[in-house]
Image: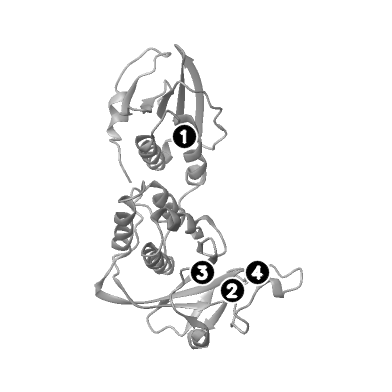
């Protein structure tokens, strides 16, 4: 994630200004002028100037957004009113400034609204924590992410990776879906955590990434870095960081998993909606049964194995 200097707020907090004055430090300049500011109450904030007016949704928990018109220009002031969330707010501002830096025209208010929508959940509650099972699951998803980067554009793969947002399957490509599972060590079973994960119309595939502890392998942080490097060569990295944050991975919050090193031993795809595939599906149950989890033996998947899926 592109970072700005958060000590800019510290400098502003030391200034003594009249109550109505607005002091700020510039972070982006052309075509979008924006920066950091501090309110008379001492709230840290982001300031945006625009010649265009756009009504931005303002009812975000722990944030206060106001708009002023000064000398024919619109000034948007976004303040954090809950000091305990300052590290979260720094993440938000970093992503917004990165988007502003990449902009080709003065559309700051619309971009601001979009970023606030992405990060509303981050600022209204605590981040998830990565346990070791979740860490291995994310490691496996990123392995599949890298696999598809060899077949599709960065933009297409980023758009397809919907698992962090809560969809039933991890990847939603235009013509097929992919659910990803990690198989750790010599585990004989693959845990399916929801009746919906292997229940979908159209082409659905189960990708199993077999990993083992190995001193020559990669940590989760190194796995993330390898994907981020590939992305940053073509696209702004903030969307990727948004998705990581939603599953509990965040460098700014020092939530990057353990130092365990994993090595990918095998990667296999299985056609999950083939007749006879060993799965339990929500559509099979009568009303009243909401959800559940189950385990499939790895050997039972063998008859449904297919070559790499890319269409």
Q: CA distance from mark 3 to mark 2?
A: 15 Å
- Residue 219 sits above or below residue 93 on the image: below
Q: Position of residue 38 (x, y in %)?
A: 38, 25
Circle nearer the N terminus (3, 2): 3
Q: CA distance from mark 4 to mark 3?
A: 17 Å
Question: Which of the two discs, 1 and 4, sits closer to the camera?
Answer: 1
Q: Is residue 291 visible to us here?
A: yes
Query: Looking at the rendered structure, which numbered label has been put on residue 179?
Result: 3
Circle nearer the N terminus (2, 1): 1
Disc 4 is placed on an element classified as loop
The residue shown at (41%, 40%) is 92
Circle nearer the N terminus (1, 3): 1
Question: Which of the two discs, 2 and 1, sits closer to the camera?
Answer: 1
The residue shown at (42%, 49%) is 239
Q: Are marks 4 and 2 in contact (CB under 8 Å)?
A: no
Toward the right, the furthest residue is: 287
Mark 1 closeness class: few <14, some 14–19, many ≥20 residues within 10 Å:
many
Q: Position of residue 152 (x, y in %)?
A: 41, 61
The part of the image, by quadrant, that contains residue 283 is bottom right
Q: Are marks 4 and 3 in contact (CB under 8 Å)?
A: no
Q: Which residue is mark 1?
A: 112
Q: Are marks 3 and 2 in contact (CB under 8 Å)?
A: no
Query: Looking at the rendered structure, which numbered label has been put on residue 293?
Result: 2
The front one of 182 and 200 is: 200
Disc 1 is placed on an element classified as helix
Q: CA distance from mark 1 to mark 4?
A: 37 Å
Q: Are marks 1 and 3 in contact (CB under 8 Å)?
A: no
Mark 2 closeness class: few <14, some 14–19, many ≥20 residues within 10 Å:
few
Q: Which residue is mark 4?
A: 291
- Residue 94 sits above or below residue 192 on the image: above
Q: Position of residue 15 (x, y in %)?
A: 30, 19
Mark 4 closeness class: few <14, some 14–19, many ≥20 residues within 10 Å:
few
């Amino acid at each position: 994630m592109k970072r700005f200097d958060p000590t800019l707020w510290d400098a502003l907090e030391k200034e003594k200004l009249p109550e109505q004055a607005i002091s700020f430090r510039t972070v982006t300049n052309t075509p979008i002028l924006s920066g950091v500011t501090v309110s008379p109450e001492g709230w840290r904030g982001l300031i945006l100037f625009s010649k265009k007016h756009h009504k931005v949704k303002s009812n975000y928990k722990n944030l206060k957004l106001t708009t002023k018109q000064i000398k024919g220009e619109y000034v948007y002031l976004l303040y954090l009113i809950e000091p305990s969330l300052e590290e979260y707010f720094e993440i938000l501002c970093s992503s917004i400034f990165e988007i502003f830096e990449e902009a080709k025209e003065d559309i700051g208010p619309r971009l601001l609204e979009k970023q606030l929508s992405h990060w509303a959940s981050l600022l209204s509650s605590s981040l998830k924590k990565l346990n070791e099972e979740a860490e291995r699951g994310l490691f496996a998803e990123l392995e599949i992410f890298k696999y598809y980067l060899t077949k599709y554009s960065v933009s297409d793969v980023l758009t397809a990776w919907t698992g962090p947002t809560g969809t039933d399957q991890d990847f939603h490509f235009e013509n097929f879906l992919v659910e990803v599972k990690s198989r750790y060590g010599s585990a004989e079973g693959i845990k399916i955590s929801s009746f919906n994960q292997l229940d979908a119309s159209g082409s659905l595939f189960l990708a199993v990434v077999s990993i083992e502890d190995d001193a020559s392998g990669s940590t989760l942080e190194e796995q993330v870095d390898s994907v981020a490097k590939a992305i940053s060569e073509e696209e702004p990295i903030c969307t990727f960081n948004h998705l990581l944050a939603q599953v509990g991975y965040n460098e700014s919050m020092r939530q990057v998993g353990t130092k365990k090193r994993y090595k990918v031993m095998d990667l296999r795809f299985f056609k999950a909606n083939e007749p006879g595939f060993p799965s339990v599906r929500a559509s099979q149950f009568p009303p009243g049964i909401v959800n559940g989890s189950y385990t499939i033996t790895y050997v039972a998947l063998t008859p449904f194995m297919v070559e790499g899926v890319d269409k």
